Image (cartoon, grey):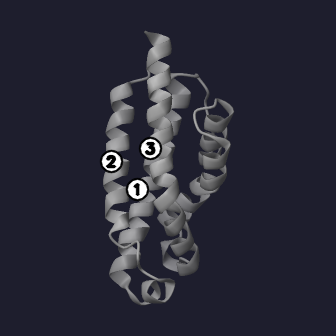
């Protein structure tokens, strides 16, 4: 796979859009969240798109720059950390995102609202951190290439 910076930038922009939408509900408390189907749908869909976008960005970097194939979503984050694309703290905050994405996609009939709410609150911090770390990595990658 050929690495394309534009592909990463396009996906980062999408992640920023998702984050903006998720922030609209950031003040919602768990009790309120349990009763608000609209908030549930917004956060569930936003988390699904956000998680998929993060994993897609990671996979693109790993395949295009490091020629590192992965077989499972969770390996993407692990390998990004190993390659020093993301920090240890971000890796620890995002660990489990691949499995959670699968729960959102395939387990939607029996979602645990507390689990989703917890991931939602974490995403409000970890998604912008991911964006910042990937942008920093891109800057470093570009300076090495040029």
Mark 2 or 3, nearer chain start: 2
Q: Is residue 56 visible?
A: no
Mark number displayed over residue 125: none
Vertical comparison of 84 with 23: above or below: above
Q: Quadrant of residue 81?
A: top right
Q: How many marks?
A: 3
Mark 3 or 1, nearer chain start: 1
Q: Which residue in the protein does label 2 denote?
A: 14
Which quadrant, please, contains the C terminus?
Answer: top left
Q: Looking at the image, which is closer to me, 59 or 119?
A: 119
Vertical comparison of 24 with 20: above or below: below
Q: Residues within 10 Å of mark 1 (few under 14, many from 20)?
A: some
Q: Are marks 1 and 2 in contact (CB under 8 Å)?
A: yes
Q: Which residue in the protein does label 1 denote?
A: 49
Distance, label 3 to label 1, CA atoms, is 14 Å
Q: Is residue 138 visible?
A: yes
For label 3, the SS is helix
Task: From the image, state whether disc 3 or disc 1 is nearer to you.
Answer: 3
Q: Which residue in the protein does label 3 denote?
A: 131
**Is 90 on the left-hand or right-hand side of 140?**
right
Q: Residues within 10 Å of mark 2 (few under 14, many from 20)?
A: some
For label 2, the SS is helix
Q: Are marks 2 and 3 in contact (CB under 8 Å)?
A: no
Vertical comparison of 62 with 116: above or below: above
Task: From the image, state whether disc 2 or disc 3 is nearer to you.
Answer: 3
**Is 49 on the left-hand or right-hand side of 31?**
left
- In percent of the image, x 58 and y 22: which residue is there? 67
């Amino acid at each position: 796979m050929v690495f394309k910076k534009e592909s990463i930038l396009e996906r980062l922009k999408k992640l920023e859009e998702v984050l903006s939408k998720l922030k609209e509900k950031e003040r919602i408390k768990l009790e309120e969240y349990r009763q608000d189907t609209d908030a549930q749908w917004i956060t569930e869909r936003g988390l699904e798109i956000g998680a998929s976008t993060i994993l897609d960005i990671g996979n693109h970097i790993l395949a295009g720059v490091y020629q590192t194939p992965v077989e499972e979503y969770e390996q993407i984050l692990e390998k990004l950390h190993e390659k020093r694309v993301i920090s240890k703290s971000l890796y620890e905050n995002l660990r489990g995102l691949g499995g959670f994405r699968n729960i959102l996609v395939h387990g939607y009939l029996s979602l645990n609202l507390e689990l989703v709410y917890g991931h939602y609150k974490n995403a409000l911090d970890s998604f912008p951190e991911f964006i910042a770390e990937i942008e920093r990595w891109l800057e470093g990658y570009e300076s090495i290439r040029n």
